[in-house]
Image (tube, grey):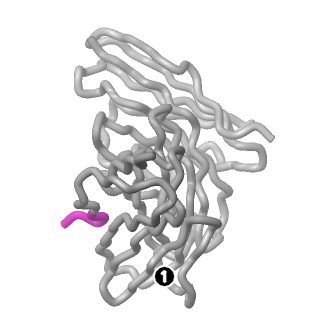
């Protein structure tokens, strides 16, 4: 079974509006971390936000927030006040295990976001 | 503070050849991971180096090998190149140890084309 599932087709959002990018995950490990990365056309993966499985509150980083629903195994990224520069591929990723030595990331297939002026 | 750097940026090889990609981690980082990203896909983990040893390995054949140097920089070697090895190769660095998570910083990648 896929560990990270991103099934949305290309997403479009109007500038200054909010958008939610979906991510579901599958793991039997009680300790894990969830990450969102942005990849513009240049190719570099840019870290956006992190959520730990034991974190009590949803993570926020500026315009980015993570809607973490543990029971549903979902970790959706919310981008508020979209900007033209937000147009990119967005990847959800997971690291399993509490030990930092196991820091391999498993990525989803990504979602393309296009922001319209 | 320099981030993760990779060289070369682009590379074109023919089938059967060998290639070496290089990565310098972010300052203060001692762990390097390599990922392969095929066109339109998410990155796939190849392997990770910590303290000059391969610590974890993904589902890649032995044609893929690596090395980490005392200054924490790393090389990825691919032998007997196949057309399917054409991809963006990403290097990520992080701090080792037993922190509950390791934020990984990625480099700009090396785009390898195999003809």
Q: Which residues are magenta?
A: A1-5
Q: Which residue is located at x 33 percent, y 90 percent?
A: A71
Q: Which residue is located at x 50 percent, y 32 percent?
A: A42
Q: With A57 as the anchor, is B110 left or right in this view?
A: left
Q: Is residue A2 magenta?
A: yes
Q: Which residue is located at x 56 percent, y 48 percent?
A: A46
- Kindly tell me whether residue B54 is visible in this rendering: no
Residue identified by numbered label 1: A53
A80 vs A86: above or below: below
Residue A68 percent location from the top left of the image: 44, 80
Q: Is residue B44 magenta?
A: no
Subunit that carries the residue with mark 1: A
Question: In the depicted view, which residue is nearer to us: A80 or A75?
Answer: A80
The answer to which quarter of the image holds residue A64 is bottom right
Image quarter hosting the C terminus of chain B: top left
Question: In the depicted view, which residue is nearer to us: A71 or B97?
Answer: A71
Question: In the depicted view, which residue is nearer to us: A42 or A70?
Answer: A42
Q: With B46 as the anchor, is A103 left or right in this view?
A: right
Image quarter hosting the N terminus of chain B: top right
Q: With B27 as the anchor, is A5 left or right in this view?
A: left
A77 vs B22: above or below: below
Numbered disc 1: secondary structure? loop
The answer to which quarter of the image holds residue A55 is bottom right
């Amino acid at each position: 079974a896929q560990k990270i599932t991103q099934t949305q087709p290309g997403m479009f959002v109007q500038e200054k509006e909010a958008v939610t990018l979906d991510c579901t995950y599958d793991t039997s490990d009680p300790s894990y971390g969830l990450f969102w990365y942005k990849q513009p056309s240049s190719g570099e993966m840019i870290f956006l936000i992190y959520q730990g499985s034991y974190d009590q509150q949803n993570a926020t980083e500026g315009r980015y927030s993570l809607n973490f629903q543990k029971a549903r195994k979902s970790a959706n990224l919310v981008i508020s006040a979209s900007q033209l520069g937000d147009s990119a591929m967005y990847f959800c990723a997971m690291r399993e295990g509490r030990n930092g030595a196991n820091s391999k990331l498993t990525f989803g297939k990504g979602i393309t976001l296009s922001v319209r002026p | 503070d320099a981030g993760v750097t990779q060289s070369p940026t682009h590379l074109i090889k023919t089938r059967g050849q060998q290639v070496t990609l290089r990565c310098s981690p972010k300052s203060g980082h001692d762990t390097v991971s390599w990922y392969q990203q095929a066109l339109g896909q998410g990155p796939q983990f190849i392997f990770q180096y910590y303290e000059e040893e391969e610590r974890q390995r993904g589902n890649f054949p032995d044609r893929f090998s690596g090395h980490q140097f005392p200054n924490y920089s790393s090389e990825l070697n691919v032998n007997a190149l196949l057309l399917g090895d054409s991809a963006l190769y990403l290097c990520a660095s992080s701090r080792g140890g037993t922190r509950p998570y390791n934020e990984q910083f990625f480099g700009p990648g090396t785009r390898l084309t195999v003809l």
